[in-house]
Image (cartoon, rainbow, N blue to C red):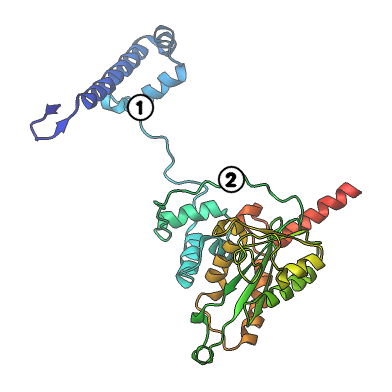
């Protein structure tokens, strides 16, 4: 280490770097002086430097060695930078929708005329200090290799979610009203069907199967669920293959649909439907109050229609309905 008079300490590595820069500038200066005396062509031959490079150094040279220092060629402004109007649009939408996630915000901005990619929006939100995503310290789960579905209906994930009490009026809570959201999501297209019931039972689950079959436009080959009592008695009978069948299982057998049970206590294996429930919490239930069961059902109709037309990252920014239509077009072209 070297201690300077101003008490600042610098390393030998820094001193070496400074010396190398000085030597480089002296070398440039000697080439420029030679070119001014003997011509650029002669200097190019002697020093083996391109004539354009020497001309550029001569243009910069004002008699001082400092004038030959390399300057950044980075442009002061980017031609693809966000315009003031775009930044204003982003700020306004984010201010009015403080709890809105990145994807929802991007879609709303696109509807308002925003033309940039979601990645570009993310970088701008970081730059503006609006979106600060803190990296998780939790150890990342490494999933097993997943076999993607090949066509609609090959497998449908089903689950049940409680409608949050925070979304219900005081009168409904006092009457001990409980509402349940039954959800089905096709693994290939990500199309969803949701249905509401006042009861959490295998009877309601069996009714939901009939609704799924009617709503989806394709044959369902397999339904995957967790081990909840509304679906199976697997845990009560400790995996006994001769256990009695629930009404839900009987309905699947009647409709010739396979039933796949995930490993107990591993909800991530039913990840698509679980993730969709988190999205429901963010986009549908957040800051909403339902005044009756009918009010919940009616408002959910508009929500699920919007959901199935909403672009998704796993579908390469296509919507579930777009994914289904793409599959139909591809199949039609193969047949033709």
Residue 189 place in picture, x, y as percent = 71, 58
Q: Is residue 215 left or right of residue 116?
A: right
Q: Is the residue 9 above or below the residue 240 in the image?
A: above
Name the residue rendered at 43%, 59% in the picture: 131
Q: Is residue 219 left or right of residue 191?
A: right
Q: Quadrant of residue 64?
A: top left
Foreground residue, 96 or 281? 281
For the point 66% across and 60% down, which residue is it?
A: 240
What residue is drawn where x is 56% and y is 64%?
A: 104
Circle 2: element type: loop
Q: Residues within 10 Å of mark 1 (few under 14, many from 20)?
A: some
**What's the CA distance linking mark 1 and mark 2?**
61 Å
Residue that mark 2 sits on: 144
Choose top left, top right, bottom left or bottom right for residue 234. bottom right
Residue at figure coordinates x 65%, y 78% from the top left: 196
Residue 86: which disc? none
1 or 2: mark nearer the eye? 2
Label 1 residue SS? helix
Residue 71 lies, in percent from the top left, at 36, 32
Residue that extends furthest to the right in the rendered view of this protein: 336
The residue wearing badge 1 is 60
Query: In front here: 145 or 51?
Result: 145
Residue 332 picture location, percent across and down: 87, 52
Left/right placement of residue 226 relative to residue 191 reads: left
Q: Which quadrant holds the N terminus?
A: top left
């Amino acid at each position: 280490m070297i201690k300077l008079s101003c008490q600042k300490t610098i390393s030998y590595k820094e001193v070496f770097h400074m010396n190398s820069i000085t030597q480089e500038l002296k070398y440039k200066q000697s080439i420029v002086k030679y070119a001014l005396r003997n011509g650029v062509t002669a200097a190019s031959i002697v020093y083996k430097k391109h004539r354009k490079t020497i001309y550029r150094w001569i243009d910069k040279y004002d008699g001082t060695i400092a004038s030959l220092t390399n300057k950044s060629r980075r442009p002061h402004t980017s031609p693809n930078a966000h315009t003031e109007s775009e930044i204003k649009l982003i700020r306004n939408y984010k201010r009015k929708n403080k709890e809105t996630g990145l994807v929802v915000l991007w879609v709303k901005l696109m509807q308002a005329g925003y033309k940039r990619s979601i990645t570009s929006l993310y970088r701008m939100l970081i730059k503006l200090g609006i979106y600060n995503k803190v990296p998780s310290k939790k150890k990342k789960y490494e999933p097993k290799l997943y076999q993607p579905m090949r066509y609609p209906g090959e497998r449908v994930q089903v689950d049940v979610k409680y409608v949050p009490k925070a979304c219900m009026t005081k009168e409904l809570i006092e009457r001990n009203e409980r509402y349940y959201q039954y959800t089905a999501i096709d693994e290939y297209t990500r199309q969803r069907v949701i249905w509401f019931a006042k009861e959490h039972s295998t009877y309601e689950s069996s009714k939901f199967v009939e609704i799924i079959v009617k709503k989806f436009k394709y044959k369902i080959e397999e339904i995957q669920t967790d081990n909840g009592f509304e679906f199976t008695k697997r845990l009560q009978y400790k995996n006994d293959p001769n256990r009695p069948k629930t009404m839900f299982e009987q309905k699947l057998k009647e409709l010739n649909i396979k039933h796949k049970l995930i490993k107990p206590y591993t909800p991530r294996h039913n990840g698509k439907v679980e993730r969709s429930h988190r999205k429901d919490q963010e986009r549908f239930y957040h800051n909403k109050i339902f005044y009756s069961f009918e009010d919940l059902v009616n408002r959910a109709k508009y929500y699920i229609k919007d959901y199935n037309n909403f672009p998704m990252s796993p579908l390469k920014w296509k919507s579930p309905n777009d994914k289904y239509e793409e599959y139909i077009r591809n199949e039609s072209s193969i047949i033709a």
